[in-house]
Amino acid sequence: MAVAQGNENVADDFPARVRTEMQRAIQRNLKGLEFLSAAPQAVGAMEKELLYRRGTALLYKFKPVRDEVYRVPLLIVTPPSNHGYIFDLAKGQSMVEFLLHRGIDIYLLDWVAPTREEAKLGLADYAEGFIPEAIGEVLAASGEDELTLAGYCMGGTLAVIHAALNPAGPVRNLLMFATPVDFTQMTMFRAWADQSHFDVDKMVDTLGNIPGDVMLGAFDLMRPANRTAGKIHLWTNMWNDEFVRSYRMFDRWAAETLPVPGEYFREQIKLLIWENALLEGTLAMRGRTADLRNITAATLNIVAQHDHVVSREAALPLMSHTSSTDSEEIVAKGGHVSLVAGTQALHRLWPKIDEWLRVRSI
């Protein structure tokens, strides 16, 4: 009797399911034409002002949304190969929005494409040039004498290098997202840039700045079917306006991957990927050595469970090789980008970051 009743329910549902699929098929085709002709998806949820610009570097201050903010400001360093709007995609998908509403005073060190003359910029120009200059601007604007330094991916690596070079500096807290420190664990990048076949000097000396599509191609090689699978997933969900909107924002961010200075790229390959100099304690800049043991700042190290770019093992030394007595690791569900953008992080991760920051920002 129960089986018969179940079959009857399925039969009753069948016409409704057919109508739903027909409607979605119509919407997919109509909206597919709209998708192809649409302007780039707008990004950016929160109001900000440009505080500082020098060459490829831009420093923004986000306008507070509460009358009172926590004392210790937050400076986010984005990777030089990417735009910083990934932290502020749209209402409801913005880490910046989430933290502003909880009283955090936020600044963003962002980048534009380097000029031909900036091809000579190296790791030291970022870790010991742009970052400390931005820190100085943030402290002047906030009236404080210490700050939380955050970084994502290579932006995090540069922030770690800066902290390791400046143990007496004003960095009170380190907040790291998917930050590689042990480059022997960046296995796909090491395979891509293996010394046996990768002539980095020829590439840099020929091109100057390294085009964004070279960087994007390296990511695509890690998961060659990802882009195709993404397009199929998009088509399947073309009827869903919210899905398409979110897809277009993330797709725009990836497509707008920035070129990077050739010397920065050369040193990234030789010093970090080939020599693993940061972890080995041999990374020298302007007469000093970046020693991870110099880092005493409170550290929150966030990694993604399914990150195909930066594995947990690559980021793990932040938990074992520094001198911090206040360090914590969060292994979050999701992938490389979902740590800093999207609705999943809004519910699962960002409340934990807020809780961690609040007690260390007073």
Image (tube, rainbow, N blue to C red):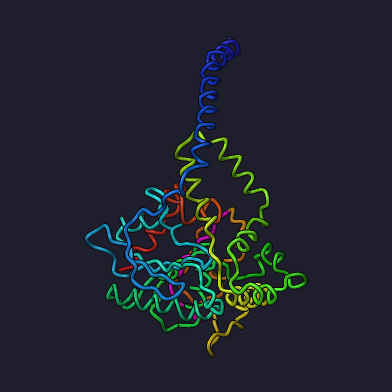
Residue at the farthest bottom position: 287
Question: Residue 16 versus residue 358: which sits nearer the camera?
Answer: 16
* 100 with respect to 346 (left or right): left
Q: Position of residue 330 (x, y in %)?
A: 50, 59
Compared to 255, does 25 lie above or below? above
Residue at the farthest left position: 67
Q: Position of residue 185 (x, y in %)?
A: 65, 66
Q: Position of residue 289 (x, y in %)?
A: 55, 85
Question: Residue 59 versus residue 361: which sits nearer the camera?
Answer: 59
* 84 with respect to 196 (left or right): left
Q: Tell me what residue is drawn at x 60 percent, y 69 percent.
A: 210
How many marks can you see?
0
Q: Tell me what residue is drawn at x 41 percent, y 59 percent.
A: 353
Q: Position of residue 280 (x, y in %)?
A: 63, 79
Q: Tell me what residue is drawn at x 62 percent, y 70 percent.
A: 182
Do we see residue 157 in this rendering? yes
* 338 with respect to 229 (left or right): left
| Quadrant of the image containing the N terminus | top right
Q: What are the residue bounds of the magenta stretch? A: 292-305
* 224 with respect to 320 (left or right): right
Magenta segment: does it hold 293?
yes
Compared to 91, does 141 lie above or below? below
Q: Tell me which corner region of the image, top left, top right, bottom left or bottom right, holds residue 44.
A: bottom left
| Quadrant of the image containing the C terminus | bottom left
